[in-house]
Image (cartoon, rainbow, N blue to C red):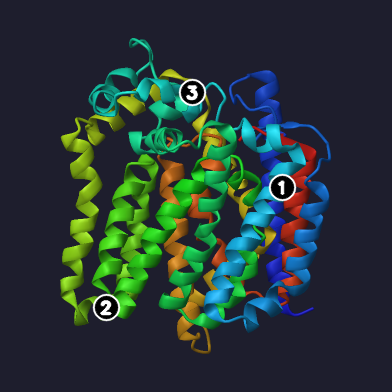
Amino acid sequence: MTRALRRDLYAAGAAALLVTAAVIVGRHIQDTRHTLFVNWPPLFADWDPHIGPGTPAALAVAAAVVAYGPTVAARLSWRALLAAAWAGAVAWIVSLALVDGWHRGIAVRLTTSNEYLQVIGRFHDIPATLRDFTHHIVSGTPDPWPAHIAGHPPAATLTFVLLDRIGLRGGGWAGMWCITVGATACAAVLVALRALTDETLARRAAPFLVLAPAAVWQGTSADAYFAAVAAWSLALLALALTRGSHACAAASGLLFGLTCYLSYGLTLFALIGAAVLALGRSGLRDRPTLLLPLLAGLAVFPVVFTLAGFDWWHAYHLLVTRYYQGVGGTRPYGYWVWANLACTAVITGPATAAGLRRTTTVLLPGPAPRPFADTRLALLVSVALLALLIADLSGMSKAETERIWLPFALWLLPSCALLPRPRAWLTAQAILALLLNHLLLTGW
C-alpha cells in the first residue's frame, strides 16, 4: 500500500469517526435534552431496516456503474457521456427512492404538512399572492405559511403551482420533476469541469457524480431541483467564458437570478461563480462585453419579483425571525456546527473525504509542480467547500443539511477525480448509499 493511499484511507476513516461521534453525541443530547428534533441524529431519519421494490434495481445500477462506469466514461463521446450520466443518475435516484415504494418514496414526499403542494390552492391569484407573501412568513401572522414555503422565496412554490396549472398535479408529478431535473445537475457539473479543467478529469469524475450517496435525498426533496438550477448557472458561465458565448452568459445570469429566488441560502453560489470567473478570466479579458448579457440575465427575476410586490431582503429578515421562532431557535448551535459537517460526509461519501485530502495536497507546495488542470479542479472544489462552511457558521442551517446542502455537495464530488483505483472507491460510495436507504427511513 502506498503512502498516498494510506492517507486517503485515513481521511475516509476520519470522516467515519466524525459521523460516529455525531451519532453518539446526538443520541445523548436528544435522549436527555430533546433539543435536536431529529430521531436519528445527525440525520433527519428513523431507524427502519427494510427492503422494497427498488432494491434489485438499486443493486443492479450500483454494480453496473462500479463495473463499467470508469471505462464507459472514458470511451463514450462527450455528448453521449452527458446523456449517459443523466440517465444513470436518474436510474440511481429512482431505484433508491423506490426502496421505500412509489407512494412513500416519491408520491407523498412533497405533499406533507410543511411541503409546497399544501399551499397550491392559495396561489389562485399569483400576483396578489406575491404581493401578500411576506405577510405570512412569521409565525403568529394570519394563515402563516408552512415551514418550507416560509423558508424559501416564492419561486420555489411557484414551480409546483405552475406544474399544477399545466396538468401535472400531485406528488407523483412533483417528485418526478425534482428527480428528472435534479439529475441534470450531474451533467452540469461535468460541463463546467470540462470547460474549466480538462476533459480527462471530467470523465474521471462522472461515475462519482452518478453514484453519489446524495442520491438518497435527491429523490425526496425539491433541493435536488434547486441544485440543478444552481449547477447549470455555473456550467453556462463556464461555457460563456471559454467559448465567448453571449447567449450562455445571459442564460447563466438568468438561472443564477432564479437560484436566488428558489433558496435564500443559495446566494452563496456567488462565491463559486466568482471562482468560475477567476478561472475563466482570460475569456472575460478577451470579451469584456460578456458582462452585459450576464448582468442583464441576472436582473430578470429580481426585477420581475420586485415589480410583482415581493421584497427579497424584507422576506429574508422575516425568515430569520420565523427560523428562531421554531425549532431553529432551540437546536443547539454547538452541536450542529460540526454535526452538519457529518451530514455532509454522509451525503458525499468516503471517496469525497479522500478526494478532499487529495485536493489539499494539490494546493499545498510540493517538490514537483502539480498538473495545471488538477490545480484548477482543486480551487473550484475548495471554493465550494468554503461556501458550505460559511452556510454552516451562519447558524441558519442547523440540521437537515443532508437535504439543504445538496447543491454544495455536488461540487465536492469532483474531487474524487483525483483518486486512483476508482472502482474500489465507487464500491464504497454505493455500499454507503445502499445501507442508508435500507436501514433508515429518511424524512426527506
Q: Position of residue 187 (x, y in %)?
A: 52, 65
Mark 3, residue position: 118
- Quadrant in which residue 164 is drawn: top left
Element on which disc 1 rests: helix
Tally of marks: 3
Element on which disc 3 rests: helix
Q: Which residue is located at x 58 percent, y 22 percent?
A: 35
- Give the mark toward the camera: 2 or 3: 3
Pick whichever of labels 1 and 3 is earlier in the sequence: 1
Element on which disc 2 rests: loop
Mark 2, residue position: 244
Residue extending furthest front? 167
Mark 1, residue position: 96
351 to 241, vertically: above or below: above
Pick whichever of labels 2 and 3 is earlier in the sequence: 3
Question: Within 10 Å of the Cα at label 1, are there few (<14), some (14-19), or many (20+) other Cα atoms?
Answer: many
Assess whether mark 3 and mark 2 are in contact (beta carbons under 8 angstroms): no
Distance between mark 1 and mark 3 Cα atoms: 25 Å
Say what amino acid the circle numbered 1 marks: Leu
Q: Is residue 43 visible?
A: no
Question: Within 10 Å of the Cα at label 2, are there few (<14), some (14-19), or many (20+) other Cα atoms?
Answer: some
